[in-house]
Amino acid sequence: MAQSPGRISLAPARGTLSVFEIALLVLCLVLVVAPIPQNLQDIIVLTFLWAGLATAWNIAGGYTGLISFGHAAFFGIGAYTSTILLVRMNVTPWVGIWCGGLLAAFCGAILAVICVRLRGPFFILSTLAAAEVIRIAALNWSSLTGGPEGLAISPAADPVNMVFASKHAYLALMLGYLLLSYALTKLIDGSRYGYYLFAARDDEDAASAAGVNPLAVRTVALMLSAALTGIGGSLFAQYFLYLDPTFVISPEVSFQFALLPAVGGLGTAIGPVLGSFLITPMSELLRSYLGSKVAGLHLAIYSALLIVVVLYFPSGIAGALSGLSRRKGGKS
């Protein structure tokens, strides 16, 4: 149930700002400026980036029910657009990042018009196929994308080219992206358009009878999700300074987009953030400490923890927090 307007709740709730969200924001700001070892800064950068990307995916997959396993296509489109503009035409990524987002949104609109009428596994397979088409194009259009060898960005520090010597700059940049994705999600969450999305997701026939155009609202949602994912792809390229099409446009990346909201809480604003804050550091730390010692052990532990979360928190971490808050409210 949504909280009354103007009220600040304890746990995250639709249409309101919670104490938990404010505290999490303060923690993120502290992490940006705190003197943290560089290896941990890398993990925090990736956590912020994946949280923003998962939030973008959730707009289509969680709010609209368009479970996409092809969002790596939009991720790659954004990454390659800004990088090609920089490497081939010397266009600053501060401009290229928005070009990548717009191109990804355009491709999202095309995918929506063609595939959004499909249901269940048929839509999922169509998104996988679309991502595979983009991956094959990136691998074979060597004159533009660099082909299998990929594209490299000059590592020389230059703020104009969005290349920084300090990790703190990247932390601030990725946090800004996360806040952009989260703010847009919160606006949708408590708006009339958000309820249209939920109506189209839960019962398309009833939504149509009530005057909602499911195709229109889903198309806009997929465009916005694709645009934010494209922006995240550009930031990924600027952080790693290299694009490998076999990774950037891969099913594994798309699965990661879907996994984080599922763990954190599908169809909630805070869920993808909580999923990334739990899964990304755990994955990176396990890989760092166990990957080189016992091959595959970090993946086994990682998978076991995921199974525990899914079994005991079927509504995700956000659902567990909401349930805990309701129980405390009932007792008081």
Image (spheres, helix red, strand yellow):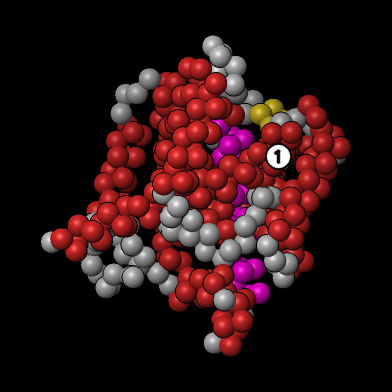
- Give the amino acid at mark 1: Ser
Q: Is residue 249 magenta?
A: no
Q: Quadrant of the C terminus?
A: bottom left
Classified by dominant secondary structure, the portion drawn in magenta counts as helix
Q: Is residue 235 magenta?
A: yes
Q: Quadrant of the N terminus?
A: bottom left
Residue at 15 percent across and 60 percent down: it is: 331
Residue 7 in view, yes or no: yes
Residue at 62 percent across and 49 percent down: it is: 230
Percent x, y of residue 291: 55, 18
Along the line of sight, the residue nearer the viewer: 237 or 120? 120
Work out whether 18 lies above or below 239. Answer: below
Residue at 57 percent across and 58 percent down: it is: 61
The part of the image, by quadrant, that contains residue 120 is bottom right
Residue 176 in view, yes or no: no
Percent x, y of residue 299: 56, 27
Along the line of sight, the residue nearer the viewer: 146 or 315? 315
Along the line of sight, the residue nearer the viewer: 286 or 116? 286
- Residue on which the image places disc 1: 250
Label 1 residue SS: loop
The part of the image, by quadrant, that contains residue 80 is top right
Percent x, y of residue 10: 24, 57
Is 199 on the left-hand or right-hand side of 31? right
Q: Residue furthest left?
A: 332
Magenta region, residue range: 215-239
Say few, some or many: other residues with alpha carbon within 10 Å of mark 1 (under 14 / 14 to 19 / 20 or more). Answer: many
Q: Residue furthest top?
A: 293
Q: How many marks?
A: 1
Percent x, y of residue 148: 80, 30
Work out whether 153 lies above or below 203. Answer: above
Residue at 75 percent across and 54 percent down: it is: 125
Work out whether 230 lies above or below 141. Answer: below
